Image: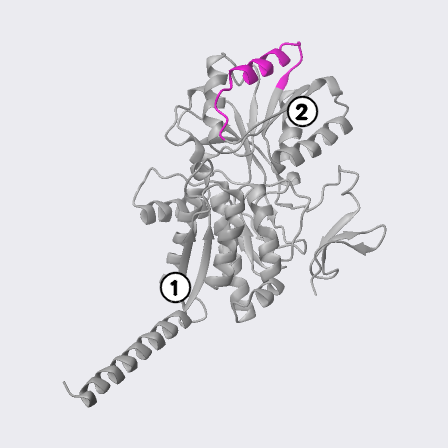
Amino acid sequence: MSLQGMRGLIKNGAVAACALLLCAAASAADTIKVGVLHSLSGTMAISETTLKDTVLMMIDEQNKKGGLLGKKLEAVVVDPASNWPLFAEKASELLEKDKVAVVFGCWTSVSRKSVLPVFEKDNGLLFYPVQYEGEESSKNVIYTGAAPNQQAIPAVDYLMKDAGVKRWVLEGTDYVYPRTTNKILEAYLKLRGVADKDILINYTPFGFSDWTAEVAKIKAFGSAGKKTAVVSTINGDANVPFYKELGNQKISAEDIPVVAFSVGEEELSGIDTKPLIGHLAAWNYFMSIKTPENEAWIAKWHAFTKNPKRTFNDPMEAHVIGFQLWVKAVEKAGTTDPEKVIAALPGLEVPNLTGSIAKVLPNHHITKPVYIGEVRGDGQFDVVWKTEKAIPGEAWSQYLAGSKDIVADWVNLKCGNYNSKTKVCSGQNYK
């Protein structure tokens, strides 16, 4: 081949390569990337994998409607593997490398705390779908799960009034959510006249499996002649051996009822629920709730997963709510720019699956109904108590001395940690 011919080939090859790069850039510009930050392996995979599937379903549904702002949505899924520092690394990748417009993710509070500095530094937007301990309000997070006043406090009130409980075991996994929630519950119980001797607090590591001694302590504590209950903030796969050991030691729901904040339909699917029958869970949604909205949604979920046995639970509903709110905010702002979307979110409303309305509050929490459910033999729940209306989420607990004067308001005060007594805003400011 002549030198001129070789030059022509090189030139044509360069043009083709440039064309490919331009096509790739154009393709990227035609999509909106949505980050999915959930553990698909490790101790939390039992709870988080199905949240990833929920976001994928929401993206599929939106794309069938024509996408968003004339563009298709594209999921960017990562696996932080139940490794808390890895959550921060993966969040950085999503925001800085993949340039996602929004992230739906995290379960544990330690994972959320890990990614929080990343979202605040890069001005990203995270929708967090799980019940948590409160004591936080970030400009960059929309908390679609329950705050303590939307789950923990109502559960204790129910046990006091309807079950006559006098002694309390606060049993949790050893990390920030159980410890802070139990700090709030201990203060609340003492405010209600419960003595120190009638409160037992215990923590075990993630993935804890040898419950023999711990359950024996609960059994002994409950043998004092006063009605005793366990308030459980045990997370992840440690729940399976915990309930199994309750059964082994013949502790029934009639003897010592357990009300759980992290056990739902997904955690109960595929395990023997006999030891759990009659025990309780406090959530803002149950799959068994009969509303036209919920029944239609479950049918769509089963069609999407091609599995009529797949369950649906509270954090999954929170992702449905969060995704719909994000879409509505993007449409209102006319852009996916997180700064403008964040500003558009407060005040927006979407229907939940149980018949009421989820509204974004100035503190970046939402309104939620509260339900107490009793475990059935099929792994579903019978609702035994519910609030009359949706409850506004409180970012800061009125039962803790250091929090009762703190206000979160990203609309008027532009602050998530404003001291109403000193008139000082601490922490992150919304400039």
Q: Is residue 47 left or right of residue 368?
A: left
Q: Earlier in the sequence, mark 2 or mark 1?
A: 1
The answer to which of 126 and 283 lies nearer the viewer is 126
> What is the quadrant of the C terminus in the image?
bottom right
Residue 284 locus on image (x, y percent): 55, 40
> What is the quadrant of the N terminus in the image?
bottom left
Residue 426 locus on image (x, y percent): 76, 54
Mark 2 in CB contact with mark 1 (< 8 angstroms): no
Residue linked to disc 2: 160
Residue 144 disc label: none
Q: Which residues are magenta?
A: 207-228
- Which residue is most to the bottom? 4
Does residue 240 lie above or below 78 as drawn? above
Q: Is residue 6 magenta?
A: no
Q: Is residue 104 left or right of residue 348?
A: left
Question: Which residue is found at the position 82% from the left and 51% from the top?
Answer: 420
Q: Secondary structure at mark 2?
A: helix
* Amino acid type assigned to the residue bearing label 2 in the image: Met
The mark tally for this picture is: 2
The answer to which of 224 and 82 lies nearer the viewer is 82
Where is residue 268, by image quadrant? top left
Residue 42 locus on image (x, y percent): 44, 37
Question: Which residue is found at the position 73% from the left and 17% from the top?
Answer: 197
Q: Secondary structure at mark 1?
A: loop
- How far apart are the alpha carbons under marks 2 and 1? 48 Å
Quick one: label 1, few (<14), some, or many (20+) residues within 10 Å? few
Residue linked to disc 1: 65
Where is residue 126, by image quadrant? bottom right
Question: Which residue is found at the position 48% from the left and 46% from the top?
Answer: 317
- Which residue is most to the left? 1
Residue 40 locus on image (x, y percent): 41, 43
User: Which of the colour schemes (rainbow, by chain, secondary structure, one colour) is used?
Assistant: one colour
